[in-house]
């Protein structure tokens, strides 16, 4: 089960490690060094959007030379906090390009559609700067500042936004209390606007709205 808090950000500036360290020290936590990676995600569904209708999101992610398959459920959202089931597994180089999904994910997909019927629906490029959060030297969460660019395949129209995710480690203990402490620390540095949307949901909403407002695609 993935447990994380999501916030919209009005700026693309990432706080310095020293600023974060001081803010988290005030709530009894410490912060590790910054780590920046670029994720290239492609989300999939069939022509009837069977996965979305069934509460599933399926993607392939390329990050640091590794190709991963991920399935997430719709889960439960309360304010900024998202709780949902996540299955993430590597895609081997020998995988069938028309049906590359690892079996635990393919098994879920087959309950609603044929995995071979899936096609790319949205592409996201995420520049992520993350900081490990520790308590008494033990990792308990990761705070990630994400600069997101989204588009539909073969489309020139794109959407861009910044957000913050705080994901709690599986063995961190009281997740609700830990999320409250991290929110208290981060609120010392920036306004926190809770987000109830996943990245995929936000891409869908913004790009579909853009298409409705600009049907000729001239960027107006």
Image (spheres, rainbow, N blue to C red):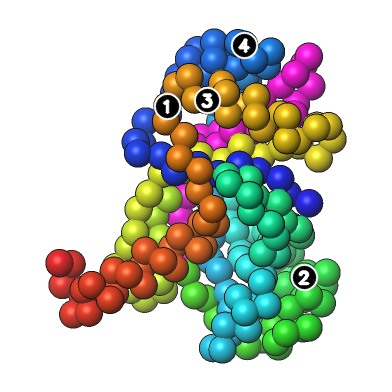
| Mark toward the start of the polypeptide (1 vs 4) | 4
* Residue 217, quarter of the rendered image: bottom left
Please say if the residues under marks 3 and 1 sit with CB atoms less than 8 Å apart: yes
Q: Quadrant of the C terminus?
A: bottom left
Q: Which residue is mark 2?
A: 105
The residue carrying pointer 3 sits among few (fewer than 14), some (14 to 19) or many (20 or more) residues within 10 Å by Cα, namely some
Q: Crowding near pointer 1: few (<14 within 10 Å), some, many (20+)?
A: few
Which residue bears the numbered disc 4? 25
- Badge nearest the viewer, 2 or 4: 4
Point out the frontmost of discs 2 and 1: 1
Residue 60, image x and y in percent? 61, 64
Q: Earlier in the sequence, mark 4 or mark 3?
A: 4
The residue carrying mark 1 is 190
> Where does the magenta region start and end?
123-147
Residue under the point 50% across and 12% down: 18
Q: Using the rendered image of the protein, determine whether residue 124 is visible from the camera's viewpoint.
A: yes
Q: Which residue is mark 3?
A: 186
CA separation in Å, label 4 and label 3: 11 Å
Disc 2 from disc 4: Cα separation: 40 Å
Work out how far the residue at label 2 is from the one at label 1, CA to CA, in angstroms.
38 Å
Q: Secondary structure at mark 1?
A: loop
Residue at image location 53% in from the left, 66% down from the top:
42
Q: Residue 109 at what x, y percent from top left?
A: 74, 78
């Amino acid at each position: 089960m993935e447990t994380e808090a999501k916030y919209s950000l009005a700026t693309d500036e990432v706080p310095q490690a020293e600023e974060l360290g001081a803010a988290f020290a005030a709530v009894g936590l410490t912060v590790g060094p910054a780590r920046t990676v670029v994720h290239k995600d492609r989300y999939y569904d069939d022509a009837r959007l069977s996965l979305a209708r069934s509460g599933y999101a399926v993607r392939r992610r390329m990050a640091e030379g590794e190709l991963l398959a991920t399935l997430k459920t719709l889960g439960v959202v309360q304010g900024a906090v998202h709780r949902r089931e996540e299955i993430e597994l590597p895609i081997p180089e020998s995988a069938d390009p028309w049906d590359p999904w690892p079996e635990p994910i393919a098994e879920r997909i087959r309950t609603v559609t044929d995995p071979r019927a899936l096609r790319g629906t949205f592409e996201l490029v995420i520049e992520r700067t993350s900081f490990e959060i520790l308590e008494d030297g033990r990792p308990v969460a990761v705070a990630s500042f994400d600069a997101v660019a989204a588009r539909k395949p073969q489309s020139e129209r794109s959407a861009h936004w910044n957000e913050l995710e705080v994901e709690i480690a599986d063995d961190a203990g009281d997740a609700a209390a830990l999320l409250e402490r991290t929110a208290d620390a981060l609120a010392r540095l920036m306004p926190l606007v809770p987000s109830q949307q996943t990245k995929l949901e936000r891409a869908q909403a913004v790009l579909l709205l853009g298409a409705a407002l600009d049907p000729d695609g001239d960027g107006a």
